Image (cartoon, rainbow, N blue to C red):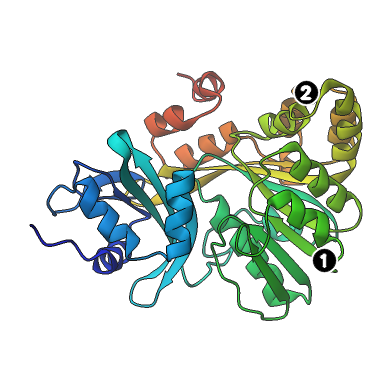
Amino acid sequence: MADIPNIRALLKNVVAYKASDLHLVSKSEPQIRIDGKLMAVNLPKLDGATIKEMCYSLITDKQKKELEENKELDFSIMLPEAGRFRVNYYYTMNSELAAAFRTIPLVIPTLDELKSPAVFKSIIKREKGLILVTGPTGSGKSTTLAAMLNEINVRESKHILTIEDPIEFVHQNKKSLFSMRGVREDTKSFAIALKHSLREDPDIILVGEMRDKETMSTAITAAETGHLVFATLHTTSAVQTVNRIIDSFDGNEQVQVRNMLSVALTAVISQALLPRIGGGRIGIFEILITNPAISNLIREDKVHQIYSQMQLNKAQSGMITQTQSMYEAIKANQITTEDALRFSVQPQELSALLGL
């Protein structure tokens, strides 16, 4: 029998190559993702039994039981010799185990190091409100949120409560106090943790993901009643994000939700990571910052008009559409026109702006 690859050594190499992900799937070599592109590692193809032996070496008996019962397992792990990882185990055809590992930097980057838009620093100075960071998987949502919380941690004395599945970035208390809760390990669900969070005297709450209407409703209520709430959604634009929240509720509930959201929503940041000319990746942001006009559009069920407000208010508010962000990045020779059009949520609008 061939030697079983050492999973810990493999993960150490993933970090050394500055890869974001490692994939173990039967009948394939291990594959890593660098700057958004998958590439095979120079190792033999793996079979299901080998992957199982590699993966089981990292988890407890309790986690093995959960995996075998639920056919899925999400967790995070710290390996002293390699680093921190968010992990998903899952089954593929013929009930063979597969795994995806996402690297989590041990040192939380600053907003300046991420070259985040300047308006982020003013957004996080709010005392209350709902700040949503959205985008597809792998677009850097967790990193942006970690950098925002780190900025607060360095400057302000706040109680910051985080609810994640699983816990990703681990914050050290600087000026602020962190209470970090993992779904399953420390609480049964996002909704239950959020419901009880208001009794835990938080100033700031991070909700790893708003998955259901109960979590959304409680997050909006917390933002409305004096807390600064950060959360993520898998949406690709600001307008789609507002619609997703409203559409998660039944028709007769939507009027109340629109009223609550019009008061509670502070900002929506929709982001994507595009290949940078010369190597690496660059963040492209669409930023909605609520003002009286936008609050009114949400309340009056005219969400489709928000986009034109974003286009008009760019100069004075820090708002920007994805199309405007991409246009500026193309003009600065940071991204190619081809990549911009490929990732754009409004390719026709971008083409017209570029005169194509």
Which disc is residue 305 wearing? 2
Quadrant of residue 338 within the rendered picture: top left
Instruction: Identify the residue at image location x=78%, y=77%.
Output: 157
Residue 337 visible in the shown view? yes
Q: Is residue 83 above or below residue 209?
A: below
Q: Pick the residue in front: 53 or 68.
A: 68
Instruction: Identify the residue at image location x=52%, y=65%.
Output: 113
Label 1 belongs to which residue? Answer: 203
- Location of the N terminus by quadrant is bottom left
Image check: 69 left or right of 308? left
Quadrant of residue 297 within the rendered picture: top right
Instruction: Identify the residue at image location x=55%, y=65%.
Output: 169
Where does residue 254 sit, x and y in percent of width and height?
Answer: 85, 27
Q: How many marks can you see?
A: 2
Where does residue 339 sit, x and y in percent of width and height?
Answer: 39, 33
Where does residue 95 sit, x and y in percent of width and height?
Answer: 32, 39
